[in-house]
Image: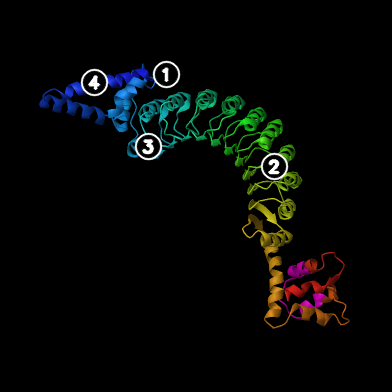
Amino acid sequence: MEQLEEDSAVLQRREGEEEAEEQQPSDQAGQDGTEDQERHTQGPEQDSGEECDTDLETEDATDKRQSLSCAEVYLQACQRIGTAPIPSFLRHLSEANLNLNHYSVGPLGAKALAIALQINKYITNLELEDCLLKAQGTRYLMEMLQTNITIQSLNLSNNQLHLEGADIISKMLSDNYYIKSLKLSGNYFDDSAAKYFADALKGDYVIKELDLSHNKFYATGGEHLGHMLATNVGIEVLNLNWNCIRMNGAVALCAGLKVNSTLKELHLLGNGFSHIEVESLGQALKQNSTLELLDLSCNRICDEDVPRLCHGLAFNDTLRVLKLSQNPMTEVGALTLLQTVKNSKSALEEIDISTVFVCEAFVELLEVARQRRPAMDVRYRVGSSVSRNLAALKVFQKFFKQRNESIMDFFQALDKEGTMKVSTAAFRKAVKEANIPLDQRQLNWLVKKFDKKCTATIIYSQFDELS
């Protein structure tokens, strides 16, 4: 490592000088101590910048500084580099979680953090989102990770890393044994950056969670990531939300998913998936046997696309969570989806179609499905008219229950000839004459429900169970 060596060496020389000063008479030591304290309280010195490109340190330097605390090393590094210490780092450096999100750390601040973190043995989760690190600050951190074996989770989202940062991180990933979770959202990564990551992660088994959301991956980037998925044997959570992986890129990504054996969560929100992409995804779900959560929210999936997706869902027995909110899907697509889940081997337990207004048939079918799967959680929307119609049957039943009568008694009274049939006209008239509290829409819905084939006749033997 060539880049921060000189800084660490300078810090070592200062340690030696301080040790020599401690051997002077006590009055001199007291005077020196006061001066040293004043340097810290006056704030960081302005550095000439000559050491900005130096490496972290040599192995020798690390060994010599083990007697210093992480806080002391950090303060000395800040003073030498010319950057202000971050109080939150000093307060939490002995905890497992260090959250410095949204601090203006910058490249030089990252350099000071990296020097201190080389000897830190407590922090396992390092949060540095939106810290203005840029590529150079990231370089210091990647060099630190060659020494630090404690940090397992790293968040570098929204740090303006661009292609140079992707190159730096991918080189770390090629020799990574400890980082399991890596968040890189919003860093302006393009298709070339996707290739860097894909090449580094082919065959990798260490990274378990990778967040590449809010970047600029298009079709080519999707192809790179799809090829990576086909050979990667470690990633369990992949977040590609808010990219634009469509057409050939989506097809390649789905091809990788088809043969992948470790991925459990795939987030594809806001990628513009439509006919071709959903077709490929359905084929992938038919063969994939590990995926448990799929987020397709905010795409372009319409009623016509739902059967394509269901083609795979019908054969998939591992997917448990499906998110489809904010798609141009209507009650038609919602009903198709629910029918597939109810009538197939699908293992879906949670479905989010919370922006779809469903019809009465959907709600009724869901009640039937829940008899077999009581834990099924489906989020949807219901219009006031649908809610009122669904309440009509309960109002109808309650009316007779309060009078200690049965629905069968009501129909038999209308069926003078005992045919077990009543005309819909006779039913409408009898309901109004009995003053059953149903409005016209509710009555129309009950007629439609009782006479499903529109024969103008109600076969009331079906209502034995409602009595």
What residue sits right under mark 3 in the picture? 122
**Identity of the amino acid at label 1?**
Met
What residue sits right under mark 1 in the picture? 1
Q: Position of residue 153 (x, y in %)?
A: 47, 36
What residue sits right under mark 2 in the picture? 285
> How many neighbours does mark 1 have within 10 angstroms: few (below 14), some (14-19), or many (20 or more)?
few
* Tag 3 secondary structure: loop
Q: CA distance from mark 3 to mark 4?
A: 27 Å
Instruction: Out of 147 and 338, give the one closest to the viewer.
Output: 147
- Mark 2 vs 1: CB contact within 8 A: no
Q: Residue 16 shows which numbered tag?
A: 4
* Residue segment shown in magenta: 427-446
> How many neighbours does mark 2 have within 10 angstroms: few (below 14), some (14-19), or many (20 or more)?
many
Q: CA distance from mark 2 to mark 1?
A: 46 Å
* Tag 1 secondary structure: loop
Give the dominant element type of the magenta stretch: helix, strand or loop.
helix
Which image quarter: residue 18?
Answer: top left
Mark 2 or mark 1: name the one nearer the start of the chain.
1
| Residue 284 appears left or right of 79 | right
Mark 1 or mark 4: name the one nearer the start of the chain.
1
> How many neighbours does mark 3 have within 10 angstroms: few (below 14), some (14-19), or many (20 or more)?
some
Q: Position of residue 36 (x, y in %)?
A: 21, 27
